[in-house]
Image: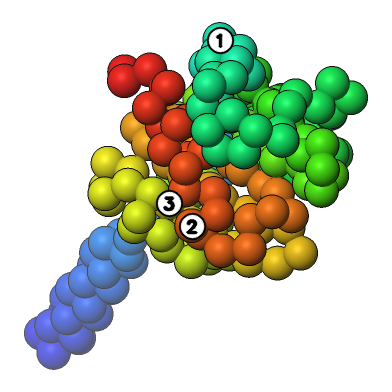
């Protein structure tokens, strides 16, 4: 009888322990789902168009108010060659540097030799400040430096030989272009370039 009672008590103790272990098993939690606000926010963010970068505005040119008689005076032109006089029918050709200067509100001039028919073009611009460096880079790539036009860096001069000789000079904010079939070498244009540089404003 005592043995039966002991087994009964032992069985009850084991059953109680099993119930206790079952009660301690952690309950699995359902996987969390994104909140409505987070989902909506993600959808809104994906539908927002990308910002378009604002283009950098180009600086304006400064008009050159000189006349052709001020770019090269009558006395200076006569000293250069008395056969030259103003070419009344002159207009810069499309795509030329002179046309670019005209578009930038510069002054474009031309004189014709009444004996040979050679035409000398001289144009002066005050380009937009953000364009000046690229103009210099283009000039040094296409032409040869000419220190006799002036002392760098105050004056940067270039000459390109060809059927028509081309001069480019930069002084301060000014860009000077001169072209002529009479310019075979840099020295042919030097007297006129000295006159132009002397007539430009110093500011």
Q: Which residue is mark 2?
A: 187
Task: Work out which quarter of the rendered image holds the N terminus and state it.
Answer: bottom left
Disc 3 to disc 2, C-alpha distance: 12 Å
Give coordinates of residue 69: x percent, y percent: 60, 15
| In the image: residue 145, left or right of residue 95 | left
Could you tell which of marks 2 and 1 lies nearer the N-terminus?
A: 1
Q: Report the front residue among 78 and 132.
A: 78
Front residue (pair 96, 59): 96
Q: Residue at x 26, y 69 (%)?
A: 21
Q: Residues within 10 Å of mark 3 (few under 14, many from 20)?
A: many
Q: Pointer 3: what residue? A: 157
Say which label, 3 or 2, has the lower sequence index. Answer: 3
| Furthest residue in direction bottom, as rendered | 3
Q: Toward which corner of the image does residue 98 lie, by quadrant?
A: top right
Query: Is label 3 or label 2 in front?
Result: 2
Q: Residues within 10 Å of mark 1 (few under 14, many from 20)?
A: few
């Amino acid at each position: 009888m005592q043995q039966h009672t002991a087994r009964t008590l032992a069985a009850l103790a084991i059953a109680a322990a099993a119930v206790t272990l079952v009660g301690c098993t952690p309950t699995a939690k359902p996987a969390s789902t994104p909140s409505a606000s987070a989902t909506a926010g993600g959808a809104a963010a994906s539908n927002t168009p990308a910002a378009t970068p604002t283009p950098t505005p180009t600086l304006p040119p400064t008009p050159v108010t000189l006349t052709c008689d001020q770019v090269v005076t009558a006395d200076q032109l006569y000293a250069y060659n008395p056969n030259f006089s103003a070419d009344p029918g002159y207009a810069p050709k499309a795509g030329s540097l002179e046309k670019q200067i005209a578009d930038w509100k510069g002054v474009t001039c031309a004189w014709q030799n009444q004996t040979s028919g050679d035409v000398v073009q001289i144009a002066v611009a005050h380009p937009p400040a953000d364009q000046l460096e690229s103009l210099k880079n283009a000039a040094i790539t296409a032409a040869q430096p000419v220190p006799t036009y002036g002392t760098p860096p105050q004056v940067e001069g270039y000459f390109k030989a060809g059927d028509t000789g081309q001069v480019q000079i930069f002084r301060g904010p000014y860009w000077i272009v001169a072209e002529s079939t009479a310019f075979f070498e840099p020295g042919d244009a030097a007297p006129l370039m000295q006159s132009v540089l002397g007539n430009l404003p110093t500011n």
